[in-house]
Amino acid sequence: MEDRVAEVLAQRAALDRGAAGGVILSLFLHAGLVGAAVYAALYSPPPKIASVLNIRFAPMPAPVAPAAPKPDAPRIEQPKPEPIKPIETKKAPEKNTVPFSPFGKSKKKGSDNPITKPTTPAPAAPAVTAALEGGDFPYTIYIERMKTLIGSRWFRPQVGGGAVVVYFAIDRDGTIRDAKIETPSGDGTFDRAALRAVLEASPLPPLPFGYAGTYLGVHLTFR
């Protein structure tokens, strides 16, 4: 019994010695941690301060309005010099001279106005008159045109003369038909020239639209 009590007491003593050692070890650990913290606080580098850059903007220049263009100075047109006209010199008229005679002795000068030969007057145009049949025909312009066309084709012979009457009919389209010597002049050459003038004038202009007849009969006298 005594041995059992002694063992319990021995175990308790051993436990007490172990607890004291644990406390001492704990104190050493805490002291080391505190010393490490103090060392770190004393010898740690100071924190870096961030640098600040100040940026200044240059002031914008005020907009300048463009200058208004200056008006061009008015141009003064100088008068053009008038061209110099050449002075015309009149030439003296050349005098006509008579050629020397075959003997070489004639020295006379001809007159300034040469002698002109007298001209024979043209024969008067032959008179052509017309008589109509078939009623009233008021178209005098057509009759004058007909006489002009026939008269331009009649060449009066130099010999003979008198008066000859030629009859012919004009159809609606202006064609001349049934041309014949109605009253001869007594000179066959004169009569044939008048008849040929009538035939060569065909066809004449058509009859006027307002004329109601189918043809127009004409008695044409040549003098």
Image: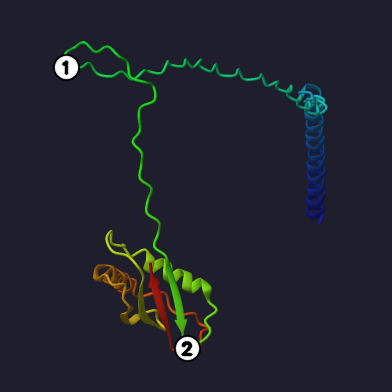
Name the residue located 59 percent from the left edge and 19 percent from the top edge. 82
Which residue is more in the foreground, 11 or 127?
A: 127
- Residue 214 coordinates in the image, percent (x, y): 44, 89
In the image, residue 66 sits, relative to residue 211, either above or below, namely above
Give the position of the C terminus as an image quadrant. bottom left
Name the residue located 46 percent from the left edge and 81 percent from the top edge. 132
Instruction: Bin the neighbour count of mark 1 within 10 Å (Cα to Cα): few under 14, some 14-19, many 20 and up.
Output: few
Name the residue located 50 percent from the left edge and 82 percent from the top edge. 209
In the image, residue 165 sits, relative to residue 102, either above or below, namely below
Does residue 28 appear to the left or right of 196 in the view shown?
Answer: right
Quadrant housing residue 28: top right
- Residue 93 coordinates in the image, percent (x, y): 41, 18
Q: Which residue is mark 2?
A: 213
In the image, residue 13 sits, relative to residue 106, either above or below, namely below
Instruction: Bin the neighbour count of mark 2 within 10 Å (Cα to Cα): few under 14, some 14-19, many 20 and up.
Output: some
- Residue 176 coordinates in the image, percent (x, y): 35, 79
Which residue is more in the foreground, 75 or 7?
A: 75
- Residue 114 coordinates in the image, percent (x, y): 36, 27
Give the position of the N terminus as an image quadrant. bottom right
Q: Secondary structure at mark 1?
A: loop
Mark earlier in primary sequence (1, 2): 1
Quadrant housing residue 24: top right
Q: Which residue is mark 1?
A: 102
| Amino acid bearing label 1 | Pro
| Amino acid bearing label 2 | Gly
Asked whether the beta carbons under mark 1 and mark 2 sit within 8 Å of each other, the answer is no
Q: Secondary structure at mark 2?
A: loop
Name the residue located 30 percent from the left edge and 71 percent from the top edge. 200
